[in-house]
Structure formats: structure tokens, C-alpha cells
Image: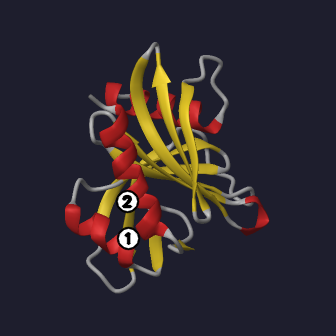
Amino acid sequence: MSRYWTAMVMLAGLLLGNVEARADVVERNAVGIWSLEAHKKDGAFDYCTVTSQYGGGAEVHFMLTRKLQWSILIKNPKWNWRPESEGTATYWIDSQERRNGRAMALRADVLMVVLADSQELLGEIREGNVMYFEPQGANNFSITLKGTSDALGALMSCLRRHYR
């Protein structure tokens, strides 16, 4: 596993609460139906997240790191991924441009997709209705984007407040 993936998996593990050395939560706020958190590790800012609960125990997390890398983590208790399996996922918002991202199953029920570093994509997610995913070798799925405009705006503000 590359250093990049190792770092992203560690961050995701901290976010999902299954790593002993949890990052300290230094800010927690509600943003509509989303929850915003800022995290520090070893006294330094590490990442911000916005999280929303979906029906049936599903969750969506958008994560933005201090290195300006962002990703989406989707948890669905009905999934059965092979943990640490890697591949690609095609994703798009509504009828917009399709993009490919690196994907990794962090657990049997959690998939992480690294998103493109693109202001255009950020705008599409903030203004869109549905985000679609086609993971390599798996069934397609989609998530609704209710409240993402405010949530992603808060995510960017969180980074500006904490990363100096």
C-alpha cells in the first residue's frame, strides 16, 4: 500500500473511530442535517469532516485534509467489500461530467473514494441533487446531496479556521 493510501486509511480510521490513537476533536457544529468536526493529531490540525446519517444505518462523510486532499467515505451496513481492496470508481453528479477516482474498501461496510481536486466538482456537489458511483467490479449506487452546499461551505471554512 502506498504512503498516500496509508495516510488516507489512517485518517479514515480516526474518523470512523476504529483506531486507538484517535485525533482530538477541536470543533463540532451542526450544519443543517450535517455534523462538522475539526480534528487535531499530536497537537497539529489534521482534517475537517462533514457527516450525515442516511436511512438504514448508512452514513456519508466528506473529508478535507490539511494537504487539501478530499475524499468521500460512504458507510452502508448492507455492503460486503473485501477490506483494503483497491480499484477505481467512476462518479458524477446529476448529468455532469464523469470522473474517475481511486477507491478503497476500508472495512466490509465502508468505501472511500478520493475526489478530484477541482473547484468545478466542488460546485457540482454543492449544487447537485444526486451523486452516482460505479465502483470497478461492484454494483452501482447513488447518494442524495441534500444540504451539501452549506455543508461543503462549512468544510472549507473549517479548514481556513484551523489550518494556519
Q: In the image, is 65 to the left or to the right of 141?
A: left
Q: Split into 4 quadrants, where in the image is the N terminus?
A: top left
Mark sitting on residue 153 = 2
Q: Position of residue 43 (x, y in %)?
A: 44, 14
Q: Is residue 146 left or right of residue 80?
A: left
Q: Position of residue 112 (x, y in %)?
A: 49, 49
Residue located beneath label 1 in the image: 126
Up the image or down, 146 lies above or below 100; here it is below
Decide: marks 2, 1 in contact (CB < 8 A)?
yes
Question: Amino acid under label 2?
Answer: Gly
Q: Is residue 80 left or right of residue 102?
A: right
User: Mark 1, residues whose alpha carbon is within 10 Å: few (<14), some, or many (≥20)?
Assistant: some
- Looking at the image, is mark 2 or mark 1 earlier in the sequence? 1
Could you say whether the residue bearing mark 2 is in a helix, strand or loop? helix
Three-letter code for the amino acid on which mark 1 is drawn: Arg
Residue 134 seen anywhere in this rendered image of the structure: no
